[in-house]
Amino acid sequence: HASKTAPYTIEPAFFEKVDDVVKLCLKNKLAVSIDLHYYPYINMHEGDSTVSFDDNIKRFYSLWEQIAKHYKNYPPEVYFDILNEPNMEMGAKLWNELIAKSVKLIRKTNPNRTLIIGTPNLGQHWTLGLLDLPKDDWNLIIQMHYYLPHFFTHQGLGYAQAAGSEGTKWYGTPEEKSPIISDFNFCAKWSKTNHRPINIGEFGVVEK
């Protein structure tokens, strides 16, 4: 939905479609999170021979510059989520670089907009400590995804290395709950220590 050559213009018709959804959400008193979900050429295994990796990084920043300008006058219930599940190939170092530059870029047009920052390595909770957040920006919400225990939530899914787990049961025993409570206690402690709120942006189970 955007050009592959500079200035990487987003299609006006696509913006209109997104606008319709955003306005419908706001009309029904819902908060809205706008994100890049996904950006495969910098965040997935796929590549694009017509656009270099470096040009895709430039394109990433251009997309956010356009999105930020487009929604700058929208109410504060509209949040910007910079990138869904930055993956392990990207790594924490590049992700932190993208965070720093994206936040600075977005702040030019949206100085008071709340931004959502995902954790490295697919939004895992245990990578909270790998984030290097802007020291002068406190209007950020840190976001993680939580799909544990994996063989229960993703049972039967081959792409998630859980093909043989179909039929896994959950009984809610103290032993089953214990690691989850431990994980959330870890996140709560990190949040309190670093003065950063945390949102669990995704959780749940597959249809099986």
Image (spheres, rainbow, N blue to C red):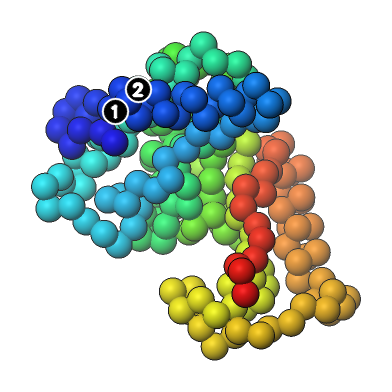
User: Which three-letter amino acid code belongs to the residue tagged 2?
Assistant: Gln
Asked whether disc 1 touches disc 2, contact meaning CB atoms under 8 Å apart, the reply is yes
Give me the residue at 30% from left, 62% from top.
Answer: 45
Can you give x and y, in whole percent of width and height, for residue 205 in the image?
64, 66
Q: Nearer the viewer, residue 4 or 199?
A: 4
Can you give x and y, in whole percent of width and height, for residue 58 in the image?
25, 34
Disc nearer the start of the sequence (1/2): 1
In the displayed structure, 172 sits above or below 53; it is below
Furthest-top residue in this view: 73
* Residue 147, label in figure: none
* Residue 10, label in figure: 1
- Say if residue 120 shows up in the picture: no
Can you give x and y, in whole percent of width and height, for residue 65 in the image?
36, 23
Give me the residue at 65% from left, 30% from top.
Answer: 31
If the image is split into quadrants, where does the N terminus sit?
Answer: top left
Give me the residue at 39% from left, 39% from top.
Answer: 98
- Say if residue 168 shows up in the picture: yes
* Residue 66, label in figure: 2
Q: CA distance from mark 1 to mark 2?
A: 8 Å
